[in-house]
Amino acid sequence: MDISQEIKNKFMARSDYWDWINKETSIIAYLDLTNMFHWQDVLGWKFRIEDAVGQLFTFSNIKEIKVYYGLNERDKKNSEAFHNRIKKTGAILKTKPMKFITKNINEGLFFQRRTMTLFDGLIKNKIQALIDELQKSGIIIEEPKCNFDVEMAMDMLDDAEKLTAVLLFSGDSDLLEPLERLKVKGKKIGIVGVRGRVASELYDIKDKYIDFGKFYTGKRAYISENPAL
């Protein structure tokens, strides 16, 4: 049976991605896992961390893989079990306790500002009535937070002498400064991300952009693996 190129492209990594990775002699990959979990909303499918790391380890010139992900102390058993899965892949896990940030209950919790402009007065009044009821109920809405910008930046700079390129799985503009320093040292910058989730500053500094959806060849599922959710 002939398979169309369009279908092949969905499940086969682009050859130029392989070519860019293979021409470097020593790559270290840095995976901001919380950032990556948010990519799933754009992709429409879920990835397995074991498959993502396993795919990277098929490249002999990727010397280390560092995964950054927080520990949910409110669900410590499941969180530690997930951490153990990461460790079993051979990746280096960097972790710290998650913080839980209380969210303000307002229209911004449900809709972007530009979306609100599309609603007429009647719908806006209904939204406000819902917000008023939630505020009166005393309900508390929290969001898990665990940023690793500082840790990732320090690791990349500390690793500078043993790598020829970094492969960064993140779209966070806060990582621009360490990447600029690596660039000055002659290091190559590979940015892995998805549409709309990579800061323009990172896209501008990259030597190679890799679309995760066209790179990942592992299993795809519809169940989130993010134990923080």
Image (cartoon, helix red, strand yellow):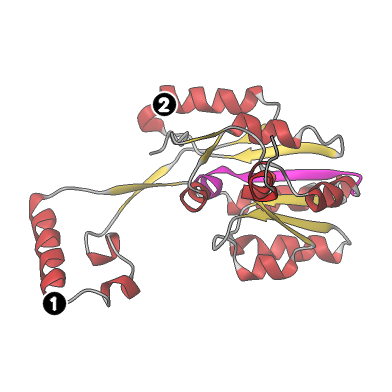
Asked whether, in this view, residue 156 is left or right of residue 105, the answer is right
Percent position of residue 170, x then y: 61, 53
Picture disc at residue 18: none
Which residue in the structure is indicated by mark 2?
76
The answer, for residue 215, to whether it is visible in the render is yes
Asked whether, in this view, residue 126 is left or right of residue 40, the answer is left
Residue kind at label 1, given as amino acid type: Gly
Name the quarter where the N terminus is drawn.
top right
Name the quarter where the C terminus is drawn.
top left
Q: Nearer the viewer, mark 1 or mark 2?
A: 1
Percent position of residue 9, x then y: 68, 48
Q: Is residue 153 above or below residue 128?
A: above
Q: Is residue 109 above or below residue 87?
A: below
Of the residues under marks 1 and 2, which one precedes in the sequence?
A: 2
Identify the secondary structure beneath mark 1.
helix
Identify the secondary structure beneath mark 2.
helix
Q: CA distance from mark 1 to mark 2?
A: 45 Å
Percent position of residue 227, x then y: 43, 33
User: What residue is shown at x 25% (from left), y 49% (from top)?
Assistant: 141
Dot 2: within a 10 Å radius of its alpha carbon, few (fewer than 14), some, or many (20 or more) residues?
few
Percent position of residue 11, x then y: 65, 41
User: What residue is shown at x 57% (from left), y 49% (from top)?
Assistant: 148
User: What residue is shown at x 72% (from left), y 37% (from top)?
Assistant: 65
Q: Nearer the viewer, residue 141 or 223?
A: 223
Instruction: Decide whether residue 30 is among the magenta residues.
Output: yes
Which image quarter: residue 75? top left
Which image quarter: residue 149? bottom right
Which residue in the structure is indicated by mark 1?
121
Q: Are marks 1 and 2 in contact (CB under 8 Å)?
A: no
Dot 1: within a 10 Å radius of its alpha carbon, few (fewer than 14), some, or many (20 or more) residues?
few
Q: Which residues are magenta?
A: 24-37
